[in-house]
Image (cartoon, grey):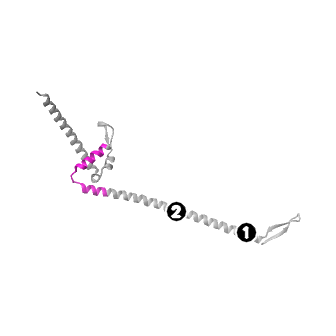
Amino acid sequence: SREELSDIDDGTFSHVPSSAAVLERAEIEAQAARQVAAAEAQAKAEAEARAKAEAARAKAEAEKRELDARVAELEREVAAAKMKGKPWTGDEDEALRRAVGESRTGEGRGSTINWQSVFEKLPPPTSLRAESTIKARWAVLRQRDADAVTLDDMRANAAAARADQP
């Protein structure tokens, strides 16, 4: 060791480091401080790199969701174009009536139709038709149903009138 024994006034000896030992200790402490600073800098750089990678991943996922939504929209447009002009089937009419019935809010004449719910409830191939086409078909069905009720009422009234005549 580079320590020397020195005589203290009371006659005892104490270990007092020599200047070489002090210099060596200072060098060790400086080296340790540099290593700590380097480790901290590396940890900070790694944390920044992780944050940048996470931000890039989140951005890529958001872009993918946007692209997926756009692809789905284009696929719906293509499907609607393929359905354009095709006649409605009885099964499609019934599916539309059922979906509208399940998607009404309110009672009687004041009720409203949640069209988004209707579109979600329709099975293919009806769900492949354009929203405007589905709404137009509902207007046709509603009028047809109203006409049928009116015709049935007229027939019932005529039958009752005939029954009343002697």
Sequence-first tag of 1 and 2: 1
Q: Nearer the viewer, residue 33 or 99?
A: 99
Number of residue marks: 2
Image side of residue 136 versus residue 25, left or right: left
Q: Amino acid at mark 1?
A: Arg
- Queried whether the magenta region covers residue 81, the answer comes back as yes
Alpha-carbon neighbours of circle 2 within 10 Å: few (<14), some, or many (≥20)? few
Choose top left, top right, bottom left or bottom right for residue 97.
top left
Image position of 40 with respect to 123: above or below: below
Q: Helix, strand or loop at disc 2?
A: helix
Q: Quadrant of residue 30?
A: bottom right
Based on the picture, tell me whether residue 55 belongs to the magenta stretch: no
> Is 155 displayed left or right of 139 in the figure?
left
Residue identifier under label 1: 25
Determine crowd level at label 1: few under 14, some 14-19, many 20+ residues with C-alpha closer than 10 A.
Answer: few
Residue under pointer 2: 50
Inter-mark Cα distance, 1 to 2: 37 Å
Residue under the image location 14 percent in, 28 percent down: 164
Q: Residue at x 66, y 66 (%)?
A: 33
Q: Position of residue 4 (x, y in %)?
A: 81, 70
Magenta span: 75-101
